[in-house]
Image (cartoon, grey):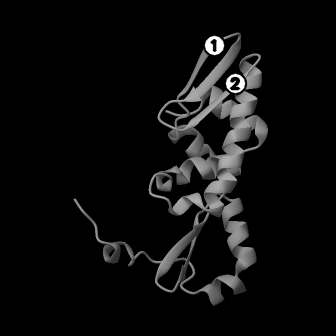
Amino acid sequence: MTYSPEALVPIAADYPTYSRAREHFKDMLDATATGRTVTVARDGAISAMLPVDRLRDYFFRTVSPRVSVFRQAGSVVVLMEGRPFVAQGTDVDDALDDLALSLREYAVDWEDRLQHAPNHHDAWALVQLVKLSTDAELRDWLERGGE
């Protein structure tokens, strides 16, 4: 079944205007602190405010890192299958640290200029996961994240 953008617009927002949301910003934060997702309508678009830990956990489980590790010429190489990321180090920890750094640099580049490039458009979830993760969480995802 195909949905048109117009079919998605009638979702009722918790706050039908930006002004109303601004007046109730503390209430919005309180609601998200209890696990609720709060929505705000503005100019026909609806945005969501939600607990970041839940969003990060969702990305952790659904964005697969697909990391492969192998040795080459005395070093350890890690690559993300299906994505343009590869790193190397003296051991697995070094290589994963380098890969995590590459992902952080990519997230900055993606927000600055790459998000509109057709071959980078689908990286939105990966970038959000990187931005919402600490270094330790990002390493954990690289080692055991995804489906």
Say whether residue 114 is left or right of residue 6.
right
Q: Residue furthest toward the left?
A: 1
Q: Is residue 8 above or below residue 73?
A: below
Q: Do the residues under discs 1 and 2 have CB atoms within 8 angstroms?
A: yes
- Residue 111 badge: none
Q: Which residue is mark 2?
A: 88
Horizontal and vertical percent for residue 117?
49, 59
Horizontal and vertical percent for residue 137?
72, 37
Q: Quadrant of residue 102?
A: top right
Q: Residue 29: in sight, yes or no?
A: yes
Q: Which SS class for mark 2?
A: strand
Say whether residue 126 is left or right of residue 33.
left
Horizontal and vertical percent for residue 134?
77, 43
Say whether residue 137 is left or right of residue 120.
right
Q: Residue 52: in sight, yes or no?
A: no
Horizontal and vertical percent for residue 114?
57, 58
Q: Is residue 121 above or below residue 105?
A: below
User: Which residue is rendered at x = 54% and y = 54% of the image?
Assistant: 124
- Residue 72 badge: 1
- Kindly identify the amino acid type of the residue bearing the numbered disc 2: Gln
- Kindly identify the amino acid type of the residue bearing the numbered disc 1: Gln
